[in-house]
Amino acid sequence: MHKNKVIIIGSGVAGLSSAVRLACDGFDVTVVEKNAYPGGKLSAFEKDGFYFDAGPSLFTCPSLIEDIFKYANEPIEPYFSYQKLNNTCNYFFSDQTFFKASSNVNELSKTLALYNNEDEQQVLNYLKQADNLYQNTGSFFLKHSLHRLSSYLSLNLLKAIKGFKLKYITKSLHKYNAKYFKHKNTTQLFNRFATYNGSSPFLAPAMLSLISHLEFNDGVFYPKGGMISITNALHQLAIKKGVKFKFNQSVDEIIIEKNCVKAVRVQNEVIESNIVISNGDVYFTYKNLLNNSRAANKILQQERSSSALIFYWGIAKEFAQLDLHNILFAENYKAEFESIFKTKIVYPDPTIYINITSKMEPGIQAPAESENWFVMINVPATDKIDWQKARIEYKKYIVQKINKILQTNIEDYIITEEVLDPKLIESKTSSYLGSIYGTSSNSILAAFLRHPNFSTQYKGLFFVGGSVHPGGGIPLCLQSATITSKIIKEKFNSKHP
Ligand SMILES: Cc1cc2nc3c(=O)[nH]c(=O)nc-3n(C[C@H](O)[C@H](O)[C@H](O)COP(=O)(O)OP(=O)(O)OC[C@H]3O[C@@H](n4cnc5c(N)ncnc54)[C@H](O)[C@@H]3O)c2cc1C
């Protein structure tokens, strides 16, 4: 039987997920990936016996991975397993307060009452509101294309409107949180969720309070083998479903005739297909693959998300104060975000995130009695900073802060190091200026201005991944794959068995 062909440019998590779904729908799918490995940002490496997830480290919404296996009618167990964490994160504040945030909401509210004098019921009310907001309004935005009339003609829209309150768009996340909580440390903790899609809590709307629902009501999880297991599982599943992969091959052009997609050019080879999905950054897709500077520049009208600077350290010591996820907060959060989004300069007191997967798999993720530290700070997505110089400056600030808070001399224990900066993020994953979540959500219109999952200009051209609707982060990228593959299935009429 003749199958409709689909070419997917890029094997990021959204590219892989789309590949599986469309292969199950009866399409003949080929993924072309410029790197030698799948996963894009969701990749990993080993150095001197230490294993590091290169990009994402926080795993929420495992049901979205399970959904792909259900769609493929394959048992997930041989490919992928995960566990729920009892503690979501260890928090260190600038006033020396330290506590573990439980994943049990009752425990969490007790902790916040004990340390920050919060009203326990008020904390529970906040999380209940976040739950409602996610289930009603959030689900509508995340699960549907915002650029198709059919989305607005469904009952889901009524549900979305029902759950909506004006304050979710008139207030910033910070203002909303500061009104809810008594202590600045609690506000800072809940402000942090804006960074989960690369935004500032002082600019992004209170809508983003729904992200806390995912972490506290739904839970934080650890995939066995680290985050790379997500990529490996989806890659293996795609192969099982007949998807073909071309690694080390860059798509140089999407060939268009009379505004219809005809083929892609991979070096000197032309691969014909009238359905193409770009999993690469939408800006580079228009600029480099379609040679359409006008469309590319239009995308630049929207602010990019933050980028990141990461030090991967092999540490010859174990730190009992630390857990899988750890945050060492900046004293002045507002000034930190101003440096990321406004002044775009090096900030001397960055909030530090430390992820240590050897806490979950000791002796496997790192040699015995050692730890694999993934030390990340949020930085501006910009090419105006000299990142080679900034690395040195930032490392000094990071080391100083870690030493002060953990009462140590961390440099004595660093036995191996790798660094990833915005410039490298751009070159490795083709994300413009190294932004890690596509565009920011720093305005109330951001959700509507993000690029659709399809092109209105070129028939047969579709998009998935962090730079298009509904946005960045693994869960949203997986949602983009579901939305896009559904549209393709409807339009090109293949069948899910
Ligand atoms: C440091 C860091 C930390 C993060 N932390 C988290 C986290 O804790 N939790 C979370 O959920 N998310 C996190 N994220 C965000 C998350 O990693 C991304 O949103 C997600 O992985 C992006 O997936 P994607 O499908 O958009 O594709 P990408 O990962 O962006 O991959 C795109 C792929 O397309 C390929 N490609 C591009 N152009 C071409 C071309 N012309 N030809 C061939 N191939 C091409 C690239 O090589 C790449 O492999 C983090 C990201 C980074 C970088």
Image: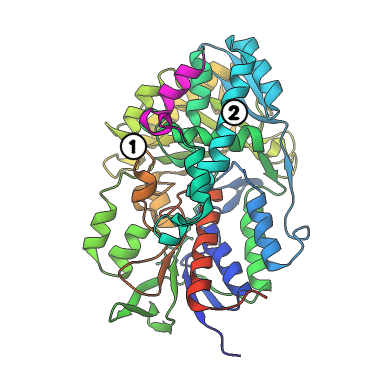
Residue at x-position 54% and y-position 55% = 479
Say which residue label 1 marks.
Answer: 389
Residue 264: % across, % down: 39, 78
Disc 1 or 2, which lies upstream in sequence?
2
Q: How is the image coloured?
A: rainbow
Q: Is residue 408 magenta?
A: no
- Magenta stretch: give its range: 165-181
Mostly what secondary structure, the magenta segment? Answer: helix
Judge whether residue 169 is colored magenta. yes
Q: What is the quadrant of the C terminus in the image?
A: bottom right
Disc 1: CA contacts within 10 A as few (<14), some (14-19) or many (>=20): few
Q: Is residue 173 above or below residue 146?
A: above
Check the image and name the residue furthest to the left: 294
Tell me if label 1 and label 2 are in contact, CB under 8 Å.
Answer: no
Image point (78%, 57%), residue name: 77
The residue carrying mark 2 is 127
Q: Say which amino acid is labelled 1.
A: Lys
Q: Secondary structure at mark 2?
A: helix
The CB of the residue at mark 2 lies under 8 Å from ligand 1 = no
Q: Secondary structure at mark 1?
A: helix
The answer to whether residue 219 is visible is no
Above or below residue 382? Residue 217 is above
Crowd around label 2: few <14 · some 14–19 · many ≥20 (10 Å): many
| Residue 318 image offset from top left, x and y in percent | 69, 29
Q: Residue at x 40, y 65 (%)?
A: 454
